[in-house]
Image: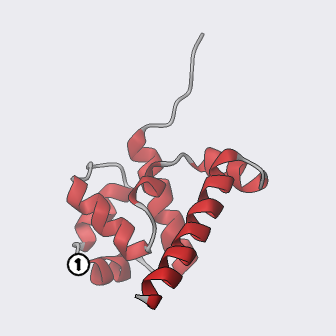
Amino acid sequence: MERNETSLRQILAANIKEQRRILGISQEKLAEISGLSWQTINSIECLRTWVSDNTLETLARTFNIDTFQLLIPPEIKTALSSDPTSALCKLAEAKKNYDSVYNDIFALI
């Protein structure tokens, strides 16, 4: 049985491109905002290089998302977003509610 799996590099590249598309920015602008070089961004998106944990965290911070979100295959993100009752969606909603309550309590202190 032959499986056509997407490599982690392909997943990362697709997610970076998608985040750039959402923000409406170029590779050059992402490089400027993140402090990474344009060549690094281009090499990641063109599957020529892998990233260090620091680079992955920098990209996630720049996109204002959790690091793991850069490594979720696009087809899984699509499936999760189309099913609002999915476990991941429920977990994300619970975290959002927790963060809100935590912030309210912290503000009182």
Q: Using the image, determine if residue 24 lies above or below residue 85.
A: below
Instruction: State left or right for residue 25 relative to residue 21.
Output: left
Q: Which residue in the protein does label 1 denote?
A: 35
Q: Using the image, determine if residue 74 lies above or below residue 31.
A: above
- The location of residue 36, given as percent across then percent down, is 23, 72
- The location of residue 3, given as percent across then percent down, is 57, 21
Furthest-bottom residue in view?
108
Residue that appears at 32% across and 56% down: 44
Dividing the picture into quadrants, the one containing residue 13 is: bottom left
Q: Using the image, determine if residue 71 lies above or below residue 106.
A: above
Q: Is mark 1 on a helix, strand or loop?
A: loop
Residue that appears at 52% across and 30% down: 5
Instruction: State left or right for residue 64 relative to residue 1.
Output: left
Coloured how? secondary structure
Amino acid type of the residue tagged 1 in the rendering: Gly
Image quadrant for the N terminus? top right
Residue that appears at 24% across and 54% down: 53
Furthest-top residue in view?
1
Residue that appears at 25% across and 61% down: 55
